[in-house]
Image: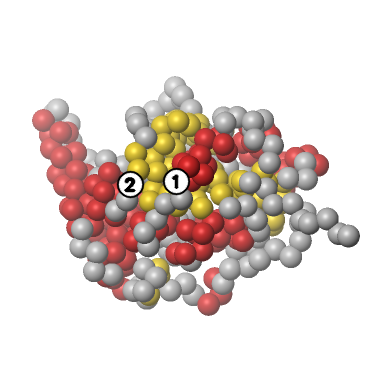
């Protein structure tokens, strides 16, 4: 009799592009997991073979799967990775992060304990850098269960959750149709694909859990030039994401939009003036508005609250393990 295929209790997925051997610290940290029963899927969208070569030594571990994809886009990569997992609970992080040994166990624990929880976000701390710039991060000072988009949008006024420290229940992922292919780095609206997925889950009756019990370290420092590019991408992406909910009639998101416009378009420059500095930061609200306008023009499915992706962006599926 043929033995049944193993279904691990938990999966981890990582999307990567042109990271090279810088992905190694993440993979080394995942290997140190205190949970043995897991699978890891890496989707590589690189333009060269350097990342694949860096991953090769780790593939001796039969829990690891490597998929080379010719497509570009974080949401595409994550959807593809999840399509090639079998576990009920899926943990997600980025290729420039380091996870603690209890990451898989702790970030999926809220879903194991509560069948209503469909999405989990954890604290993402910046790796200390003695330079001028910024590393994206989010810090939760307590555990919190969010059960409505109104509460999620109120929380997001202070900052968005990060997909670098995220987990999702497969049933919730399937319920909402996965990540929106038009959102996230590498897509038209280059941000907020992680928050968007959790908001759509909330609208379907799933809860989101913010946990302070586990921390992922983010080695994603941006210098000032890189930060300016990130600001343009992220605020445009947030605007495009928010417009979906306006078009779907979810007017509670207006408070979130107005708060961001006032915070970055009024409060920030006013502080500069009071401190005797030249007002800065106007690019942020401008890009947010541009994202809103372009989101209004982009083909959209009101029923799924997802943008219509071009036909050639269809999800591919791996037919084998590397």
Element at badge 1? Answer: loop
- Determine which of the numbered discs, if any, sits on residue 3 in the image: none
Residue carrying label 2: 146
Please identify the quadrant where the N terminus is shown: bottom right
Q: Position of residue 269 (x, y in %)?
A: 17, 39
Res. 79 image quadrant: bottom right
* Nearest to the observer: residue 201 or residue 124: 201
Number of marks in picture: 2
Image point 63% across, 39% down: which residue?
23
Residue 100, above or below 285: above
Residue 275, above or below 157: above
Res. 29 image quadrant: top right
Element at badge 2? Answer: strand
Residue 110, above or below 215: below
* Nearest to the observer: residue 275 or residue 87: 87
Q: Is residue 266 left or right of residue 316?
A: left
Q: Residues within 10 Å of mark 1 (few under 14, many from 20)?
A: few
Q: Residues within 10 Å of mark 2 (few under 14, many from 20)?
A: some
Q: Is residue 204 left or right of residue 289?
A: right
Q: Position of residue 45 (x, y in %)?
A: 62, 56
Residue carrying label 1: 114
């Amino acid at each position: 009799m043929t033995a049944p295929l193993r279904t691990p209790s938990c999966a981890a997925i990582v999307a990567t592009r042109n990271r090279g051997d810088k992905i190694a610290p993440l993979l080394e940290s995942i290997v140190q997991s205190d949970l043995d029963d897991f699978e890891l899927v890496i989707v590589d969208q690189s333009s060269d073979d350097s990342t694949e070569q860096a991953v090769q030594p780790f593939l001796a571990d039969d829990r690891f799967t490597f998929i080379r994809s010719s497509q570009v886009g974080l949401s595409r990569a994550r959807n593809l990775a999840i399509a090639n997992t079998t576990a009920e609970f899926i943990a997600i992080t980025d290729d420039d992060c380091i996870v603690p040994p209890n990451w898989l166990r702790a970030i999926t624990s809220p879903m194991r304990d509560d069948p209503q929880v469909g999405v989990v976000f954890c604290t993402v701390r910046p790796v200390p850098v003695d330079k001028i710039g910024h590393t994206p991060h989010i810090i939760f000072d307590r555990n919190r269960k969010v059960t409505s988009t109104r509460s999620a949008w109120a929380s997001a006024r202070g900052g968005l959750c990060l997909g670098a420290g995220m987990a999702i229940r497969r049933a919730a992922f399937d319920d909402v149709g996965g990540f929106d292919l038009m959102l996230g780095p590498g897509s038209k609206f280059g941000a907020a694909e992680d928050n968007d997925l959790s908001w759509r889950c909330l609208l379907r009756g799933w809860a989101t859990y913010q946990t302070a019990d586990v921390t992922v370290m983010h080695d994603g420092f941006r210098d000032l030039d890189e930060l300016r590019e990130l600001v343009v991408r992220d605020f445009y992406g947030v605007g495009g994401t928010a417009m979906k909910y306006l078009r779907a009639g979810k007017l509670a998101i207006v408070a979130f939009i107005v708060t961001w416009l006032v915070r970055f378009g009024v409060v920030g420059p006013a502080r500069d003036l009071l401190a005797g500095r030249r007002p800065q930061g106007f690019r942020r609200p401008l890009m947010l508005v541009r994202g809103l306008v372009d989101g209004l023009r982009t083909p959209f499915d009101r029923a799924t609250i997802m943008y219509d992706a071009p036909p050639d962006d269809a999800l591919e599926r791996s037919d084998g393990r590397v």
